[in-house]
Amino acid sequence: PFFPPAGPRPLPPPPLVNKGSVWLGLTGWLAALLDNGFAHRPVLKAGVHRQILFVTVGWFAGYFLVKHTEYVHAKLDRELLDYVRRHPEDFKEPGW
């Protein structure tokens, strides 16, 4: 039988609806609305395809930024815990 290699488990992917994707999706939509306003076009009616494109790009950019941030934090946590495990003398419990 096949056994997976020992080591850290891979991180699960973040959910598609997370804080970063929602915020950057809204930011993309507002950017499209501002572009319509600056170009003297009807703000909500003009360039609906551009609005959808900006929301989609912002949504996926936010998703991948959250994914990268979680990876960096997990890597730092793993390195810190490995250091604590290798150097227990630096992290003794305060005794009487």
Image: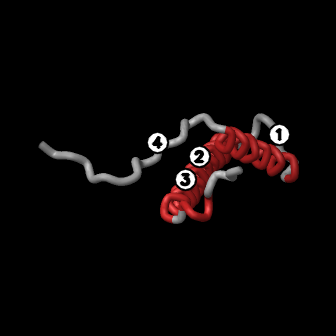
Q: In terms of depth relative to the viewer, which is nearer, 1 or 18? A: 1
Which residue type carries mark 2?
A: Tyr
The residue positioned 78% from the left and 49% from the top of the image is: 31
Residue 49 appears in the figure: no
SS under mark 3: helix
Identify which residue, 20 or 95, lies in the foreground. Answer: 95
Write down the residue under mark 1: 43
Q: Circle 4 sits on which residue? A: 12
* Residue 24, percent from left and from top: 70, 46
Do tag 3 and tag 4 residues touch (Cβ < 8 Å)? no
Point out the tag, 2 or 3, that comes first from the N-terminus: 2
Q: Residues under labels 1 and 3: Cα distance?
A: 42 Å
Q: CA distance from mark 3 to mark 4?
A: 11 Å
Circles 2 and 3: CB atoms closer than 8 Å: no
Q: Nearer the viewer, mark 2 or mark 3?
A: 3
Nearest to N terminus: mark 3 or mark 4: 4
Q: Nearer the viewer, mark 1 or mark 3?
A: 3
Q: Residues within 10 Å of mark 2 (few under 14, many from 20)?
A: many
Mark 1 neighbour class, 10 Å CA radius: few under 14, some 14 to 19, many 20 or more? some
Near-viewer residue (77 or 66) = 77
User: Could you tell me which residue is drawn at 61 percent across and 64 percent down?
Assistant: 90
Q: Comparing marks 3 and 4, which lies closer to the viewer? A: 3
Q: Are marks 4 and 1 in contact (CB under 8 Å)?
A: no
State the residue at coordinates (84%, 52%): 39
* SS state under label 1: loop
Q: SS of the residue at dot 2?
A: helix
Give the number of the disc on residue 53.
none
Residue where numbered disc 3 is placed: 74
**Residue 45 visible from this viewpoint:** yes
Number of numbered tags placed on the structure image: 4
Disc 2 target residue: 63
Can you give x and y, in whole percent of width and height, for residue 49 in the image? 64, 42
